[in-house]
Structures are given as C-alpha cells and as structure tokens.
Amino acid sequence: MPAPGAPCDQGTVGRAECTMELFPKNRTILDRPLMQFRPFGLTPSGDKIRDVSGVTVRANIEYLEEVAGTPQGDDTTPHVVQRLCDLLNARIGNPAYHVTDQFLRNVWNSYSYEFTCYLGEFCILLSGNPRFQFEMGKHKFISPVIQTLGRPFSVSQIFRMFPHFGEKFAKGSIHFTARDVTHNSAVLSMKFADHIYQQFGPYRKRCADIVCQASKAGLLAVPQYIHHLGFASVRDLQCIADGDECCEWEFHWPTQPFFTRVQWTTVGTMVSGSALGYLRWAHPELSWVEAGTWAVIPGLTTWFAGHWYGLKQKADEREHLIKEQVTSVNTHHEELREAYLDQERTAVELRQKVSQLTTLYQTGLEFNATLDRETLLKNVLHTIMTELHYDLVMISFFDRDRQIAYDARMLGAPPDVTRYARSMEIPVTDASSIEGEVLLQGRPLLINDLRQAWPRLHPLNRQLAQRTNVQSCLSVPLKAPPRSPGQTQGHAFPQGVERESKERILGSLTVNRSIEHALTGDDVHVMVTVANQVAIALDNADAYHEIEALNAGLESRIQERTRSLEEANAKLRELDQLKSTFVSIASHEVRTPLTAIKGLVESMRDGFTGPLSDRQVFFLTRVTHNIDRLTRMLNDLLDLSRIEAGRVDFTPTDVALVPVAEDVIEQLRPQAEKQSVTLQITHPPDLVPIRGDRDKILQIMTNLTHNAMKFTPPSGRITIALTPRDDHTVQVCVEDTGCGIPPEDLPQVFDRFYRSRNNATSVQGATRGAGLGLAITKSLVELHRGRIWVDSTPGQGSRFVFTLPTRDADNPDTG
C-alpha cells in the first residue's frame, strides 16, 4: 500500500483500483507542503487544464473581500487578497505558476481541482468562517449572466438541464445526473472523474466536502436568484466525504405562480355567457339548463385553446430566445476561453524561459565563484535542487582509464542512501547500456518510466533506484573541453564509441522528480547547459589544484627568497636610517663653520680689514654667493631628512592664500627685476581659506616660483593663479613662459636628486641645485593631503599645479 500522500499511478488508477489510505475529512490538503500538480496551463502531456472555471475562483475572491472587509473596513480587502496570493504562491514550487490578484479575478482562466482546494482552504482560514464555501456558493455562484439566461426556464427545467451544462463546463472532470424532477423538487448527484481523485490524493474526503458544500449551495440558490421564489431546501442523500460513491442531494422549492389562469377563465366565461344569450334568443324553446349546457362547450373550448396557444407561444419564444443566447454565449465563451488558454500557455512558457535563463546565469556565476572542489559540488547540488526544483540531484564521476563510474554525490535522499551511492563503483564498458549511453557515447538520456529501461540498467543502479523510489530521471554527461592533445592519448574506448570533438567526459549529472512524466524536453535543454557549466567549473577546479601542486616547490623557494629579501630590506632600512642621521648631523656640523666663514667674508668685503681692490671684492662676492648656495643645499638635505624620518613640524591653521602668494612675490621681486621677469598673481575675490601650515605653504610656493625663475628668460612672465574647485580644494598654479620641460623628463621631475640632462635649458647665470627642491615640494603638498602635477610644452613654458584642502573639507588634521 502506498504511503499516505503518495499519488496513485496515472496509467492504471481508477477510483476502485486506488488502494491508498484516505484521511478523514478533518485532514485538509494544506498538510501537503507543495502542490503536486500544475495549477493551470497545460499538463506535462500537453493537455489543457480545464477542471475548474475562473468564475468559481473569482466568486471565492469576491466573497472573501466582502467577509474580510466587513469588520475592519475596505482598506483591509487588498491586504487579504494579497495575503491569499502569498499563501498560494508559497505552496506552488515553480515560480512560473505564481498567481496575482489580477490573475485570480480573470473569469476566463481555468484551474486544477488541487489548486482550487488549496484556495478554498485558505479562504476558510482568512475569513475565519468554517462554512465559507457554503455561504460563498449560496451568494456568489449564480452570476448575473446565468440569471439572465435561466429566467425563461422554470426551476424544474433548469434542474433537468443541469447535467448537460455542468458537464459542458466541467470538461470531463465531474459527472452530473438529475432524477425525479417535478415542478417543485429534484434529486441531483455529482461524481468526480478518476484524474480528479488523483489530485485529491489521500485528502479526497476533505476536498470533496469543499466542492460539495459550494455546489449544493449554488444549486439551492437557483429558485431565489432566477425566479425570486426564495432559497430551496436541501437534504443530503449521499456524500463522498462520508465514504459514498457520489454526492447526492434532494431539493424542494416553492411552486411558481401561474398568472394567466384568471385571464383565460374570464375570457372563457365571457364566451359562455355570449353563447347562452344567443341560444336563449335564437332558440327560446330550450330551457335554461339546456341552453347553459350548450353554452359551456364554446367557453371551455375557447379557454383551452387560448391557454394552450399562449403557453405554446411563450414556450416557443423562450426556446428561441434561449437557443440564441446559449449559442451566442457558448460560441463567445469557447472562443475567449481557447484564446485565453493559448495566451496563458504562452505566458507560462515565457515565464519559464525567463526563469530558466535567469537561473542559468546565476548558476554560472555561483559555479565559477569558487575553485574548491568540495565547496563547488555542494553549491552545484544545492543550486540545482532549489533553483530548478528537482527532488533529487546526483553527480557521479567517470574514470576513463578504469572505465568505472564512482564517487557519486547525492542531495535529496536519506543519509544512508547518500553514503551507499558514494561507495558504489560501477563498471561502464557497454555503450548500449544506460550508463554507457551517457558516459561513453556522451548523450543526454531522458527516461520517463524507469521500469521500461530496467534491463539496460546496472544492478547497482537498480538497487539505488529502488532505495530512492525513482520513477523517472534525466541524466546528462559532464563534458569538458580538451586540455591538450597529449592528455587524451592512450585511453581505450569501447568499439563503436566515437570521441566527439575530443571532449572529455568527467562524469554525469542526474536529476529526477517524484511525479511520473514530470520531466520534459525543456528539462533536457536546461540540464545540458547546466552540465556544461558544471563540467567547466569542475575542470577549472581540478586544473587549479594541479597548478597548486606544481607550484608547491616554487612557493617554498619564493618564501625562502622572500625571507632573504626581507633581511636585505631590513639592512637597507638600517643603512637608510644611518644615512639620515649622518645627513642631519653633517648638515648641522657644516652649517656652523659656513656661518662663521660667511661672516668673516662679509666683514672683509665691507672694509673692516682695509681697503679692497675691485677684483678682491668680486672674488669675495662669489665666495658669499656659493656659501649661500651651499647653505640652501644643506637646508634642503635637512628638510628631506626630516620628511623621510617623519619629524616635520606641522601646525594646521586656517590660511589665506592670497597674502602668502604676495609674500612670495615680494621676497623674490629683487631677483625677478634683476632678471627682467614679471611676477603676478590672479585670484577671485573672497577666496575661501585653506587648512594647512602657513610656513610649509610659503615654502611650496617659493620653491616653485624660484624654480620657474631659473628657466624663464628676460621679459618673461611668471603667474601664480589661485582657483577654488568644487571638491572643497583650492588649486594653485605656478605658470611660466620659459623653455619648458622635454616630455621624456616629465615623469622624473619630482624625483630626489633629479636634474635635467639638458644644461642649456636654464637661464644664464642661474645656479642649479642638488635636485631636491621639487621632491621636497611634492612631499609637503602630500603632507597637506593635496596633489601636485606638471604640464609643460617645450619652448612655451611649464605649469606646476597643486591642490590644498579648504577648511570646509572633511579631512582630519595632519600631523
């Protein structure tokens, strides 16, 4: 006996043949975690799903809105319907079939009974009314269209036609019968088709009860909504929920009034009276009794003839009207329904394709996100099961040298089955076997009924199929591109097996769903693409580990070499520190005697030692000039030493750049006038202050302006331009009209001890420094969290540009 909840075999299951255990009617279908059948669209075999009309589903939605909106107001209604959609979608495994509020309101949709039972149970939960289905059927099943179409017919006629219209719209899902129909009573029955019982599964009693309550409530409302006779009374004779073969009800309703009987009686009486008068006038010999007897005959004849003619005329008119209405409505209904079913199928297919493409893209990213083999296998199994909605996924590997399938990894089975699958080693030598067709021939294989392929399956795989209760499966090869010609040589292949494009088969990827015939050609296309991605990812992981193994020795040697370099680097840092200390000490020691020498030379030049000749004054002036130059070089070395050691005094304050630039101009103006060079400043009004050390900024501008004077010929011009920027900085540009810098020298202008190789570029008489000024300038700019660069055109001049943060900039103080 199948376990409760397991679907019966579709090919052989009839209602009498299904031996599954049925749950009592207090067990709802909500105990089933997910829907096992497609809710709408097409069945796996391609048939249209037309069990329940969209009119029924819309009736549930509208009545749920009325019930939910009564206590809390209309604002809660959309929330309740959306909640219903969320609950339904949580039970639909395939996102392509998820529903929306608008979708459920479309009367042209058709649904499966399994979906409708889920919807009915959720409506009961959301409304809090256990009789929701009965009340909904009583107040919503008789739509305005049905009321209009049924009005020409009496209640008894409608109940006689009930089986015809019921089976027309149920399309083979429910069988209806009507018997013992009188003018005020009828017995109607309903029985489900076998494929509906399969959808119900072990929850048949509860599902049948939901449908039964709604159906009989809709039928007892016919007299009220079509002829305003009041609701019919109903008595249950049989019910599937109680274990009977069908649901059978007995209905009683008030008799319809016959309004024309008095009219025709009056006419007949008048005819009889006229006949009596004529007989008394024409045949006075007749007595009153005789004349009355003869006078009754034409009156009765007139009454019967008129009454019969009126009834026949009305019946003919009604019959003609209803035939036209039914024909028109049926034609229109079928056209719209078929069109919408096609549209619905197309929409589902498009959503499936989009979902598949999205999933393939995401899986490709996830598969290639790791190079760890075990992590990759876990990601592959989990992603395929959750994103592509399979019940079981297995990856097995193939050893081409030994020709065995081994090390199968499985997800979706119990732990003991998973361990058994991993321990199996299956020989694969026969290309016509199931395993050989996939692993030797490299072909994907879809098996909808595993029993038909049982003889071609290896015994170990048969045992695995029995332990996992697999009924259908899809297996595709894991094909990886060839690495090199030498890697595929020497492998033996069975006779008749071709190596297509020399692809390497790493193993196989197998999936299945628990429901038979649930795998289609679409699954084959998707899984072939997924298998290719998995094979490439596995091949990349294997190649990565091979490279790791090859690089193990190299890495050891690199580490040893790195240690040697680190030791050498530490020694170099020690020497650099010694150099900085030496420079600092030497600069101080040299600057002291230089100061004394300069003082003595200036005293001699000023005549304290006696009169001097012009030649002696010239030589003493040159000595003073070179002492100043040597002092500047010592100062530069000392600044650079402090910067490298991180011992620069930095005091950030709000600094106005315009006065700083003016100080630079005033300081260098005597030398500029001597060289016939014009110095100028350009700046906007109300320039925002910057945040920095004023002395260091003065040194930066002085270095750049002094450097520009070295390379600017007479009649040239040097401009200091101050410009605010949008990024909370101020740009300072020192532009000259000098000789410019060759393009090949631009990358090195800020390097320490760099001096241009072209000695002819400087102005005659300008002394060249040690190549430290621009390096110190760059370091001071970066100390302010600024940036410096140079643009130059040979023969036209250079532009040294740097930026400094304003006081409004979100920068921490530097120091």
Image (spheres, rainbow, N blue to C red):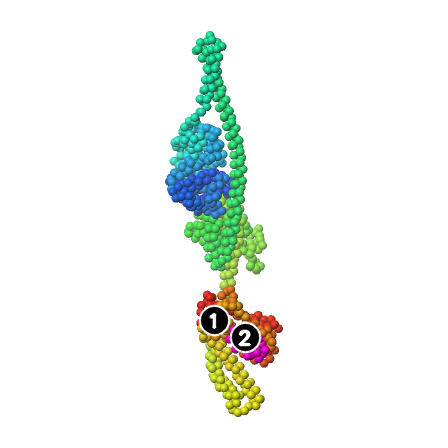
Q: Which type of secondary structure does the marked residue at label 2 adopt?
A: helix
Residue 261 in percent (x, y) is at 45, 22
Residue 572 numbered tag: none
Q: Nearer the viewer, mark 1 or mark 2?
A: 1
Residue 705: mark in rendering: 2
Characterize the local packing of mark 2: few (<14), some (14-19) or many (20 or more) Cα atoms within 10 angstroms.
many
User: Where is 630 relative to 750, above or below?
Assistant: below
**Local secondary structure at mark 1:** strand
User: Along the horizontal axis of the image, is 707 left or right of 20?
Assistant: right
Magenta segment, prevailing SS (helix, strand or loop): helix
Residue at the outermost front position: 685
Looking at the rendering, the stretch of residues picked out in magenta corresponds to 661-678
Dividing the picture into quadrants, the one containing residue 288 is top left
Q: Which residue is mark 1?
A: 655
> Which amino acid is tagged 2?
Thr
The quadrant of the picture occupied by the C terminus is bottom left
Q: Relative to residue 177, is residue 679 depicted above or below?
A: below
